[in-house]
Image (spheres, grey):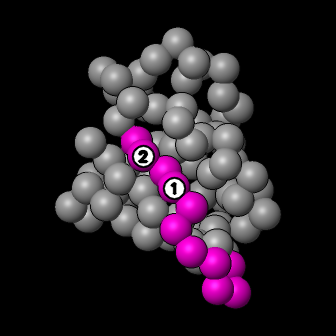
Amino acid sequence: MSTDTTTERDFQLSTKAQTLANYLREEATENGGEIYVKGKFISDEVGLSAKEIGQLMRQLQGTFSDLTIEKWSYSAATTWRVESS
């Protein structure tokens, strides 16, 4: 899946990172531009473990011009705020 806002840096990301980014972008867009996620709740949907998701979320922060990812809170698992522009 390709978007008009794909940058050169996007192509250096692993397949897993691209899969997660695409999932986050689609979910945020479908839900009014903003979502809050926990890795353990989306792991089955993206085919990654919660640990992999946490590592990739840190890696994806600041990578895309159309996707803002920030660590939001921690209670039993990290909650991530994702905004699509």
> Where 36 sits versus 64, above or below?
below
Q: Nearer the viewer, residue 35 or 20?
A: 35
Q: Position of residue 53 (x, y in %)?
A: 68, 58
Image quarter where the N terminus lies is top left
Look at the numbered discs 2 and 1 and tell me whether their residues touch, using CB distance below 8 Å.
yes
Relative to 64, say whether 67 is above or below.
below
Q: Which residue is mark 1?
A: 70
Task: Determine which of the numbered discs, if any, sits on residue 68 in the image.
Answer: 2
Q: Position of residue 40 (x, y in %)?
A: 66, 75
Q: Is residue 10 visible?
A: yes
Q: Residue furthest top?
A: 8
Q: Residue at x 37, y 65 (%)?
A: 35
Residue at figure coordinates x 26%, y 42% from the top left:
85
Q: Position of residue 45 (x, y in %)?
A: 56, 65
Q: Is residue 72 magenta?
A: yes
Q: What segment carries the magenta color?
A: 67-77
Residue found farthest to the left: 32
38 vs 33: above or below: below
Q: Secondary structure at mark 2?
A: strand
- In the image, what residue type sits under mark 1? Glu
- Disc 2 to disc 1, how far (Cα)? 7 Å
Residue 16 appears at what percent x and percent y? 68, 42
- In this image, 68 relative to 34: left or right? right
- The answer to whether one can see residue 30 in this image is no
Residue 75 image-quadrant placement: bottom right
